[in-house]
Image (spheres, rainbow, N blue to C red):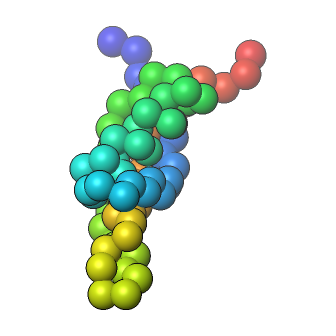
Amino acid sequence: MSESVYKIIELVGTSSKSWEDAVQNVVEKASTSLRDLRIAEVQKLDAKIENGKIVAYRARVTVSFKYQPKD
């Protein structure tokens, strides 16, 4: 079995609908430029409030992907 190394980065996703959508937005966007995504871990959830109403849900997410150094 070969050993692997993974890199972890932190991203923030937003949604006007829900925290779940905010997390999904992070994963979808990250997958367009990062290869071999493995894990998404929600670190923090918060919401933007205007005039007493939630207008945006935000999710701080760490994602890990397999590290592949340039040869």
Does residue 42 lie above or below 55 as drawn?
A: above
Between 50 and 19, the one lying in front of the other is 50
- Left or right of 8? Residue 44 is left
Between 30 and 38, the one lying in front of the other is 30
Q: Residue furthest bottom?
A: 51
Q: Position of residue 63 (x, y in %)?
A: 42, 44
Which residue shows up at 37% across the image and 70% down it?
55
Q: How many circles with numbers are drawn on the protein?
A: 0
**Displayed quadrant of residue 47:** bottom left
Q: Is residue 24 visible?
A: yes
Viewport quadrant of the N terminus: top left
Q: Residue furthest right?
A: 71
Between 59 and 17, the one lying in front of the other is 17
**Displayed quadrant of residue 68:** top right
Which residue shows up at 25% across the image and 50% down it?
20
- Left or right of 50? Residue 30 is right
Q: Position of residue 25 (x, y in %)?
A: 41, 43
Does residue 45 lie above or below 50 as drawn?
A: above
Which residue shows up at 49% across the image and 29% down it?
31
- Left or right of 8? Residue 71 is right
Q: Position of residue 8 (x, y in %)?
A: 48, 46
Does residue 39 lie above or below 44 as drawn?
A: above
- Left or right of 71? Residue 36 is left
Which residue shows up at 50% across the image and 53% down it?
11
Q: Residue furthest front?
A: 51
Q: Position of residue 19 (x, y in %)?
A: 27, 57
Viewport quadrant of the C terminus: top right
Q: Is residue 66 visible?
A: no
